[in-house]
Each structure stands twice: as structure tokens, then as C-alpha cells.
Amino acid sequence: MTDMSDMLAAVLVKNGLLTAFAVVGITMWLAYFLSARLTRGHLHGSALAIMLGLLMAYIGGVATGGKHGVVDIKLLSGIGLLGGSMLRDFAIVSTAYGATLTDMRRCGMSGIVSLLLGVVLSFVAGAAVALAFGYTDAVSITTIGAGAVTYIVGPVTGAAIGASSEVMALSIAAGLVKSVLVMIGAPFFARSIGLDNPRTAMVFGGMMGTTSGVCGALAAIDPKLVPYGAMTSTFYTGLGCLMGPSVLFLATKALLG
């Protein structure tokens, strides 16, 4: 029995990326199962999956004394590749393929305004938090502010302007917190803010931006609204990646002198 377990472990370690896909798939299935059974879909499965992932990362870091979460467990080392920059950037590009300029024009002026306003307001909020925690250099403040835009924009901006890995990790954490809050909070406030039609779903996607958070929230409110929110939130991520290391960084640098 021990020999069989050792053989299975060796196969899983050798095929780390496939193991990572299997672990993520099981985690997603468990999250959606718990969402349906315990919350009747009010707390979307994506939000639970993120929470489970963060919990697993914490347990992995504590158990091994390492700094990379579950990646420090040899059996789960493939998750480091699955969650690495290569597949992250591929995900950004593949998501953008679902949106066109024609779709953008359908959003109208409200969609364009919500995109610009959403990126700037999220950045300002994140930058304010960075200042409150004692960061004073433009690079760190811009990176954390960009993380508040989305957890994708944060590391993309940080890598472009030379931020440290610790600051980029904080920017990702800021984006994850925002994503989870949007997923959890939006369904409870949907009726009071009129989030029940395609137009408001587009504005919501443009203001919040985090695609995973927006899609998770809209799926809990009304699955038919998901494509509309995803349309503007996809552009939001791309716009944030363009503005973060350029306009927003230069503006932050100018304000800080």
C-alpha cells in the first residue's frame, strides 16, 4: 500500500501542471456545491473558490514555513506554473478576444464614462490606502492603487514601473479583497441600485471592473446579465493596464513631487 501511495505521489509530482488543474477543478466544484447547498446561490461559487484558495495558501505556508503558499508543498508545486505570469497574461489576452469595438459602442456614453470613472476612483481609493499605511514613493503607491483597480492591473503595472515583489503582492491582495467584496455585496444591494437590466449591468461592470467579481455577482443576481457586465469589465482591465504604468503613474509622480 505504501509503495502504491509513493508511486501515485511521484506521478502527481512529475505531472505538476495536470495535478494543479485537477486541484483547482476540485476546489471549484466544492465551492459551487457549497454555494448551492449553503447559500442557495446568494454567495457565488467563484467567491467561495477564492476564499478556499486563500485558506489553502495560508495553510500551505504555515505547514511548510514557506513563502509561496501551497506551491511550497511539493505535490502542489504545479500551481506555481498554473498561477504564474505566463498563464495570467494568456488569460488577459483570451478574455479580451470576447470584446470588440462594436460591442463597446453599444455601451454608449454611460459605458465609456463608467470605465474611466471606475478606473480613476478605484485607483484613488487604493492610493489613499497605500498612503495611510506609510508608503510615500510613487512606484509603491501607483502599484497598490492599480491593484485596487483589479488584481491583474496591479502586478502588470508594478512590473512595468519596477515595483518590488512585496508591493506587487499587496496590490494583488487589494484586488482580491475588492473582487470578493463585489461578489458578496452586490447581490444584496442589486434591487436598491436598479441592477436588473443590461444597461445598468454594463455600467456596473465599468464601475467595478473586476471581471471575476462582476461576473460572480451578476450570476447570483441574474445569469442573463453576465455577458453585459463582462463586456465592460473586460475593457476595464485592459484600460487599467494601459493607464496604470502611464497616465496614473505620471500623475502620482507629479503630485508627490
Image (cartoon, rainbow, N blue to C red):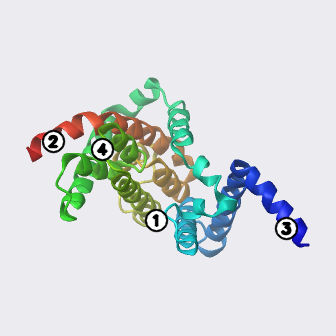
Q: Is residue 43 visible?
A: no
**Residue carrying label 2:** 253
Are the residues at dot 4 and dot 1 in contact (C-beta closer than 8 Å)?
A: no
| Neighbourhood count class around disc 3 (C-alpha, 10 Å): few under 14, some 14–19, many 20 upward | few
Most foreground residue, 198 or 13: 13
Residue type (three-letter) at the residue carrying disc 4: Val
In the displayed structure, would residue 88 be above or below residue 99? below
- Say which label, 3 or 1, has the lower sequence index: 3
Q: Calculate the distance from the C-alpha at mark 4 to the C-alpha at mark 3.
A: 50 Å
Which residue is nearer to you in this view: 60 or 202?
A: 60
The residue labelled by disc 4 is 119
The residue that disc 1 covers is: 184
Are circles 4 and 2 on residues that touch, CB within 8 Å? no
Give the side of residue 94 with respect to residue 15, left or right.
left
> Please, what is the three-letter code of the amino acid marked with disc 1?
Ile
Q: Which of the 4 image quarters holds residue 113?
A: top left
Q: Which of marks 4 and 2 is nearer the N terminus?
A: 4
For marks 4 and 1, give the one nearer the viewer.
4
Q: Determine contact: label 4, label 3, CB under 8 Å.
A: no
